[in-house]
């Protein structure tokens, strides 16, 4: 079991159970939307972020992104890493019916997918492995614009197609997408991927 230095923040206890079978880490549950009114928990998370760093790992549905975006605004950006699970349609075993958007949440992900999400986010594994190290020049908003992913008439559709192809959640905003791309790819690798998209 891999040991992770950062504190991992998840929505609920089933997510925590799933994750605790994959990594040895401090895992804090938010209680879903309850975190919006819990000032004590928020100040606790700020303190943890300062001391150990945080990794936010929410579901890839709309509700997960509402929570993620709230935390982005409430916590210091330089001490928080964002881990994303892919959009995979299905239903968790314990549930009678799938969620509103029909996507699996953190609790429904396979261990390898959760580990990869943490690795891609730049988790500090205590055995010395870190993901995103120095990658050279970052991907910029100008790159996204040049590729027609922002500022054009069909930019939203192009972004959706790229997010789907790269196995990233469809609810990412352009800024969230830029952040995720910089976590996952070097600028050179991303531009190569985007070029493949345009080739016939």
Image: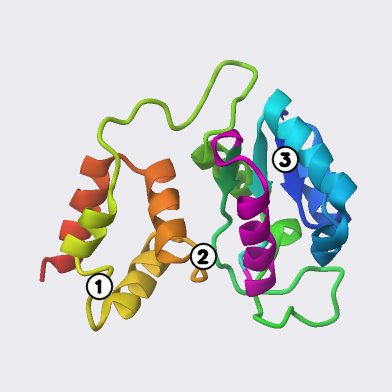
| Picture quarter with the N terminus | top right
Q: Position of residue 69 (x, y in %)?
A: 61, 60
Q: Is residue 4 visible?
A: no
Left or right: 125 as drawn, with respect to 31: left
Mark in the foreground, 3 or 1: 1
Which quarter of the figure has residue 155? Answer: bottom left
Q: Earlier in the sequence, mark 3 or mark 1?
A: 3
In the structure shown, which secondary structural element does the residue marked by tag 3 occupy?
Answer: strand
Q: Is most of the magenta stretch helix, strand or loop?
A: helix
Q: Position of residue 27 (x, y in %)?
A: 80, 40
Q: Position of residue 89 (x, y in %)?
A: 61, 74
Question: Is residue 77 highlighted in magenta?
Answer: yes
Between 25 and 151, which is closer to the camera in this rendering?
Answer: 151
Mark 3 near mark 2, Cβ–Cβ under 8 Å?
Answer: no
Which quarter of the figure has residue 159? Answer: bottom left
Q: CA distance from mark 3 to mark 2?
A: 19 Å
Residue position for label 3: 8
Specify the farthest residue to the top.
Answer: 128
Per the rendered image, the range of residues in magenta is 61-79
Q: Earlier in the sequence, mark 3 or mark 2?
A: 3
Left or right: 14 as drawn, with respect to 6: right
| Mark 3 neighbour density, 10 Å: few (under 14) some (14–19) many (20 or more) | many
In the structure shown, which secondary structural element does the residue marked by tag 1 occupy?
Answer: loop
Where 126 falls versus 174 (above or below)? above
Residue position for label 1: 151
Residue position for label 2: 169
Left or right: 34 as drawn, with respect to 65: right
């Amino acid at each position: 079991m891999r040991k992770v230095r950062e504190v991992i923040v998840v929505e609920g206890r089933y997510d925590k159970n799933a994750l605790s079978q994959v990594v040895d880490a401090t895992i804090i549950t938010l209680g879903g939307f309850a975190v919006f009114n819990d000032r004590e928990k928020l100040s606790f998370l700020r303190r943890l972020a300062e001391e150990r760093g945080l990794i936010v790992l929410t579901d890839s549905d709309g509700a997960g992104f509402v929570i993620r975006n709230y935390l982005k605004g409430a916590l210091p950006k330089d001490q928080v890493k964002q881990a994303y699970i892919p959009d995979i349609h299905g239903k968790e075993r314990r549930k009678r019916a799938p969620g509103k958007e029909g996507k699996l949440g953190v609790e429904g992900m396979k261990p390898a997918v959760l580990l990869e999400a943490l690795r891609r986010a730049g988790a500090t594994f205590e055995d010395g492995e870190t993901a995103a190290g120095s990658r050279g020049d970052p991907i910029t908003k100008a790159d996204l614009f040049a590729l027609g992913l922002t500022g054009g008439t069909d930019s939203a559709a192009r972004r959706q197609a790229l997010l789907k192809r790269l196995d990233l959640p469809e609810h990412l905003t352009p800024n969230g997408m830029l952040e995720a791309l910089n976590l996952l790819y070097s600028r050179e690798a991303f531009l190569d991927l985007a070029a493949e998209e345009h080739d016939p």
